[in-house]
Image (cartoon, helix red, strand yellow):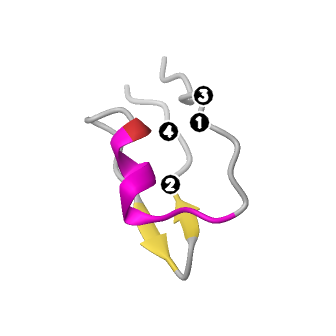
Amino acid sequence: MTAAPILPERHEWTVDDLGDLPKDLPYELINGRLIVPAPTAVH
């Protein structure tokens, strides 16, 4: 089972804010918005 990480609340993200994220979390930063994929079940 995969759990969604709890992310800090921010309206806009900067490169400096990315240090607060878990190291194994895949993400993209696009125009100040943090984009993370939805967790998927692995069988």
Q: Main secondary structure of the magenta part?
A: helix
Region in magenta: 12-19
The answer to whether mark 1 and mark 2 are in CB contact below 8 A is yes
The image quadrant of residue 33 is: bottom right
Of the two numbered discs 2 and 3 on the same chain, state the one appearing first in sequence: 3
Give the foreground label among 1 and 2.
Answer: 1
Q: Are marks 1 and 3 in contact (CB under 8 Å)?
A: yes
SS at badge 4: loop
Question: Label 4 is placed on what type of residue?
Answer: Thr
Tell which tag, 2 or 3, sits nearer the viewer.
3
Front label number (1 vs 4): 1
- Report the Cα–Cα distance between label 3 and label 4: 16 Å
Residue 6, by quadrant, is top right
Residue 14 counted in the magenta span: yes
16 w.r.t. 22: above or below: below
**Camera-side residue of 40 and 7:** 7
Characterize the local packing of mark 4: few (<14), some (14-19) or many (20 or more) Cα atoms within 10 angstroms: few
Q: Where does label 3 land, which residue?
A: 6
User: In the figure, 27 relative to 5: above or below?
Assistant: below
26 up-or-down from 13: above or below? above
- Badge 2 element: loop
Tell me the residue that label 1 is attached to.
Answer: 7
Sequence-earlier tag: 1 or 4: 1
Type of residue at label 2? Val
Tell me the kind of residue under disc 1: Leu
Q: Position of residue 28 (x, y in %)?
A: 41, 66
Query: Real-space Cα distance between discs 1 and 4?
Result: 17 Å
Residue sticking out furthest to the bottom: 31
Residue 18 location (% of width, % of height): 39, 50
Between label 3 and label 4, give the one nearer the viewer. 3
